[in-house]
Image (cartoon, rainbow, N blue to C red):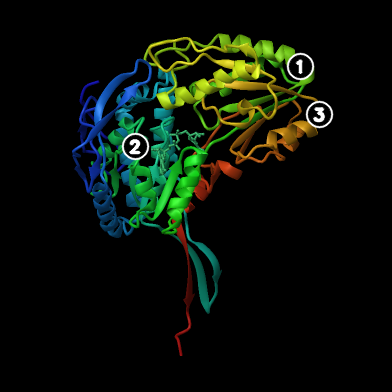
């Protein structure tokens, strides 16, 4: 990938600007509008071949202090910039991202491992999400308005937002926090995952060409940085996406300063398949949603409940579709599934494969990890493991999924809800009324009928139970970046 010159195509205000940015090297963190070098550096790995990627900074506590100071200063002015002006800058920034689509997409595959079609889809979605969120208005609510007084509820920005991003969607989950934070008048510090820092750092570098210093900053660090950020007095809100275990640490740490927190956490999504479905068609879709991104999505199907009357036929169809996947280096044409992203995740997923033998689980397909140069794991389906086994109760976050059978509707609803998680769920049935009735009984933030993983930037997204607190995206998501202020405007002169 070479340095690319970007021509802004006119959606925003900076139509004449021609920014350029290198995607091959120079991965810097940005504090107060400037690259901020660090003494120490580290690097990520390409998960398809374990080769070292370019070096990235390791932020210190002092870097964080400087970033929060710069953010505080920038917030004073940015929060007063009229909404339409902020929106125009966000849209101009989206245009620049779009012009750099190929560069972002290639960088994403090389750091995350996802194949070209999925990296393309994530890059498209990252841009689309920002544009769509820029179309959502957050007007004041007029509660009362008469001759004597008006009472108005306003949504005012919080200040400096710390955005903590995981390694499975490094682009989309960063822009999904950037746009609402900036549009509502906040400033933001992006902390990418140490496993996938590259796209996040380039996003913030590019942002400098559109936003004043201190409005969009980045910090690239090691495992110390997250806890420093969540406990820092200069951070007003943490927008966190990651695992449930880390989410609990974030709440604990943020409680000392009572900073606002939104948590988008893990999932253990069930699919409930009713007996009236077209088995082959539904099995194909369920295979897709269970194994997409090699099982490294919070919303992958992680428990598949199939009615006993169609179980054998469904299992065979599912196995057929899973066998058609092509696992390999995501940068190559024709690959549908890439490696796991990192060694930590690979080692964790391996423990579920160890359980196959020790627990005597029956395997429908896969079951062994073929040694390779990268973090590749063979797609695996476990045939009816016990309901209390790890593979049913925990989130493996890899391509290994339990297939379960059930007898009655009541029983399967109870089993689907019998989890600490509550992110998503789907019901697969030709009788839409019945499907809707079951869907409404699901304890999950998003429920689908005859699909899964459909998302919209205009719809709030969040988890019930231990899958999260609060929502992101949509009007509700924008409100999460605001304090509520009620204004009583007394029209009579005080006597
Ligand atoms: P993780 O919790 O290990 O890390 C997420 C981020 O938190 C990283 O940037 C990491 O550096 C940072 N972090 C680590 N320890 C921290 C601490 N003590 N304080 C503050 N920050 C800390 O998660 P991951 O392994 O990167 O991502 C996978 C998990 O994320 C899965 O459980 C998945 O379901 C979940 N996830 C949820 C959503 C959602 O929207 N609900 C989306 C994607 C991923």
Q: 108 or 399, which lies in front?
A: 399
Residue under label 1: 310
- Using the rendered image of the protein, determine whether residue 342 is visible from the camera's viewpoint: no
- Regarding mark 2 in the picture, which secondary structure is present there? helix
Q: Quadrant of residue 74?
A: bottom left
Say which of 213 and 304 sits in front: 304
Look at mark 3 in the image and give the residue it sits on. Answer: 408
**Residue 360 visible to the viewer:** yes
Between 35 and 344, the one nearer to me in the picture: 344
Looking at the picture, how far across and down is residue 463, in whole percent?
Answer: 57, 42
Residue at image point 26% right, 50% down: 67
Image region (quadrant) for ligand 1: top left
Q: Earlier in the sequence, mark 3 or mark 1?
A: 1
Q: Residues within 10 Å of mark 1 (few under 14, many from 20)?
A: some
Q: For this view, does 283 lie left or right of residue 288?
A: right
What is the C-alpha distance between the residues marked 3 and 1? Answer: 13 Å
- Going from the N terminus, do you reach mark 2 or mark 3 first? 2
Q: Residue at x 23, y 24 (%)?
A: 24
For the N terminus, the image quarter is: top left
Quadrant for residue 54, please give it. top left
- Height in image: 140 above or below 183? below
Find residue 222 and report its horizontal and vertical position in percent: 32, 37
**Residue that sits furthest to the front in the current view:** 358
What residue is pinned by disc 2?
Answer: 94
Q: Is mark 2 within 8 Å of ligand 1?
A: no
Return the x and y of residue 356 as percentages of the image width and height: 60, 17
């Amino acid at each position: 990938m070479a340095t690319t010159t970007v021509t802004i195509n006119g959606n925003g205000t900076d139509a004449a600007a021609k920014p350029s940015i290198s995607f091959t090297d120079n991965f810097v963190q940005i504090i107060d509008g400037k690259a901020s070098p660090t003494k120490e550096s580290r690097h990520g790995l390409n998960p398809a071949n374990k080769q070292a990627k370019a070096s990235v900074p390791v932020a210190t506590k002092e870097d964080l202090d400087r970033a929060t100071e710069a953010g505080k200063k920038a917030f004073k002015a940015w929060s007063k910039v009229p909404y339409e002006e902020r929106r125009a800058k966000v849209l101009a920034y989206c245009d620049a991202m779009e012009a750099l689509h190929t560069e972002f997409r290639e960088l994403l595959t090389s750091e995350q491992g996802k194949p070209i079609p999925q990296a393309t889809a994530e890059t498209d979605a990252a841009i689309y999400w920002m544009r769509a969120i820029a179309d959502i208005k957050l007007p004041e609510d007029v509660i009362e308005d008469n001759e004597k007084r008006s009472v108005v509820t306003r949504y005012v920005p919080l200040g400096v937002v710390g955005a903590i991003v995981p390694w499975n969607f490094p682009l989309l989950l960063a822009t999904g926090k950037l746009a609402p934070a900036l549009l509502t008048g906040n400033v933001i510090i992006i902390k990418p995952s140490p496993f996938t820092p590259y796209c996040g750092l380039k996003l913030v570098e590019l942002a400098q060409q559109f936003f004043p210093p201190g409005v969009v900053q980045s910090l690239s660090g090691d495992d110390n940085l997250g806890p420093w950020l969540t406990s820092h007095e200069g951070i007003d809100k943490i927008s966190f996406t990651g695992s449930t275990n880390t989410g609990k640490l974030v709440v604990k740490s943020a409680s000392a300063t009572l900073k606002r927190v939104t948590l988008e956490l893990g999932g253990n999504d069930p699919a409930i398949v009713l007996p009236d479905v077209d088995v082959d068609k539904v099995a194909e879709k369920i295979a897709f949603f269970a194994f997409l991104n090699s099982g490294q999505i919070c919303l992958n199907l992680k428990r598949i409940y199939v009615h006993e009357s169609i179980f054998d036929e469904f299992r065979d169809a599912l196995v057929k579709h899973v066998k058609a996947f092509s696992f390999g280096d995501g940068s190559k044409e024709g690959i549908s599934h890439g490696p796991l992203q990192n060694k930590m995740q690979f080692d964790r997923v391996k423990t579920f494969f160890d359980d196959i033998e020790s627990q005597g689980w029956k395997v429908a397909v896969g079951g062994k990890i073929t040694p390779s140069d990268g973090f590749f794991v063979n797609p695996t389906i476990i045939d009816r493991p016990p309901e209390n086994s790890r593979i049913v109760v925990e989130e493996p976050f890899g391509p290994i999924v339990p297939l379960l059978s059930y007898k009655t509707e009541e029983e399967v609803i109870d089993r689907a809800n019998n989890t600490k998680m509550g992110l998503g769920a789907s019901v697969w049935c030709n009788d839409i009324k019945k499907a809707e009735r079951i869907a409404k009984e699901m304890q999950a933030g998003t429920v689908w009928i005859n699909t899964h993983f459909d998302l919209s930037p205009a719809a709030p997204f969040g988890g019930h139970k231990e899958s999260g607190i609060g929502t992101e995206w949509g009007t509700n998501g924008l409100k999460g970046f605001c304090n509520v202020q009620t204004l009583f405007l007394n029209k009579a002169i005080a006597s």
